[in-house]
Image: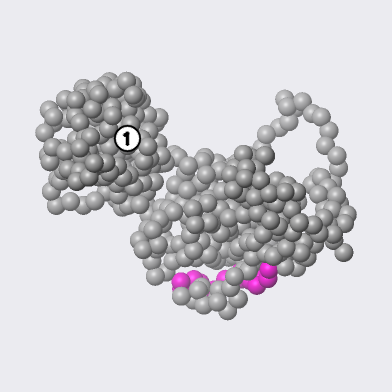
Amino acid sequence: MAKSRTAYVCTECGAQLARWQGQCPQCQAWNTLVESVVEAAPGAGGRFAAIAGQASRLQPLSSLQPREEPRQPTGLEEFDRVLGGGLVSGGVVLIGGDPGIGKSTLLLQALSHLAGSQSVVYVSGEESGEQVALRAQRLQLPPSPLQMLAEINLERILAALRDSRPRVAVIDSIQTVYSETLQSAPGSVAQVRECAAQLTRFAKQSGTSLILVGHVTKDGTLAGPRVLEHIVDTVLYFEGDTHSSFRLIRAFKNRFGAVNELGVFAMTERGLRGVSNPSAIFLSQHGQQVPGSCVLVTQEGTRPLLVEIQALVDAAHSPNPRRLSVGLEQTRLAMLLAVLHRHAGIACFDQDVFVNAVGGVKIAEPAADLAILFAIVSSLRSRPLRRGLAVFGEVGLAGEIRPAPRGQERLKEAAKLGFDVAIVPKANAPKQAPEGMRVIAVERVEEALERLRDLE
């Protein structure tokens, strides 16, 4: 029988302490220690023996031969893009998102496609087999030899996986799985960490591609210990408003591909469908040009996207003007307004400023600075920008406009969608502009605003 004790476990890093503290001494996070029952299973050392079955030995790095991991396409092009080309043998993927956003639907579609050529297993801890079959019928998926297992016991799940030896397995979700060696409830820090470690070990030993579905907290982060994200090879997040028909999948960690890659889906009656031209959903279709709207050419991983940045500047009716940013960094907005006042002489200290990225996309790169400034100036003056104008560039505190990475790819994407004028940093000016496009290179904020007025 395993011995149990009470300890305070950090939900961020999994550290264990005998007494409660306000701050975790390991990861320095505040208010993350939760009282939990921690068990020590007898003979635990044998469960964590080397995967290769023998002790490792020192080897010179130059003697090791790198190998390219083969990819297994899932049949969903946008999903494969985020994964880096497809699933990797022995790779472990963790995918999280808000309830009802489409995680189970996406994975059921992918497994139905894969089941036609190889052995796949879907382990459901939240729904019965009949409920999953009803969803497959609603999505009108073709009949396939997909193996279904409704189970939450870790030992039984591992036994079934060892017997069937699938190429791909899905655990939906990791928070519902529990191990008999621990007495704590499913979803606790100890259970999530133990179950994820055992399933990952099985995937590495057998070569099975494993996909774990994770719950998220009210803040949108993955529930459970932060060590869960360190164990797996790839971490994907579902984004988007559940009231909208569009869904975004973003890669935050990927050992086999690029991070910050973005996949765009549309939710239909028959499940999720990839969007071949995602820029179209982030651009509003105005009948005529409106003030406060500027088109930004942003970069998500290897994909350039055109996103409409909207700004509304209105007279403040309180002593403290409001600064609100949706889809963009809140603190950066205040900095840009200060730069606009200092270097261009345009003051907004008595104005409420609201900025929004259309389509629910979240933009973190600083190359959106110039488009935000243009949208603010356009709204403040109530004068629309020129039709067919695309913008990108980072703005520094000294008023300089810094270059953005992959500038040539951004310009080609804008030209492909019919934009004929672009204002870009001087360092991003191409030797030869894309066909049908005029590129205006600027070095400072005041110069950019002057060129903007010339285009009106």
Residue in the picture at 13% in, 29% down: 453
What percent of the width, then of the height, locates residue 34? 65, 54
Q: Nearer the viewer, residue 99 or 266?
A: 99
What percent of the width, then of the height, locates residue 163? 76, 65
- As for residue 144 lying within the magenta part, the answer is yes
- Assign the C terminus to one quadrant of the image: top left
Left or right: residue 453 versus residue 162 is left
Decide whether the magenta segment is chiefly helix, strand or loop. loop
What percent of the width, then of the height, locates residue 103? 51, 61
Colour scheme shown: one colour
Tell me which amino acid carries mark 1: Ala
Left or right: residue 160 versus residue 272 is right
Circle 1 SS class:
helix
- Assign the N terminus to one quadrant of the image: bottom right
First to last magenta residue range: 139-152
Residue at the spot of label 1: 334
What percent of the width, then of the height, locates residue 414? 28, 38
Residue in the picture at 74% in, 59% down: 37
Visible residue check, residue 291: yes
Residue 145 sits above or below residue 413 on the image = below
Residue in the picture at 49% in, 53% down: 220
- As for residue 110 lying within the magenta part, the answer is no
Figure quadrant of residue 29:
top right
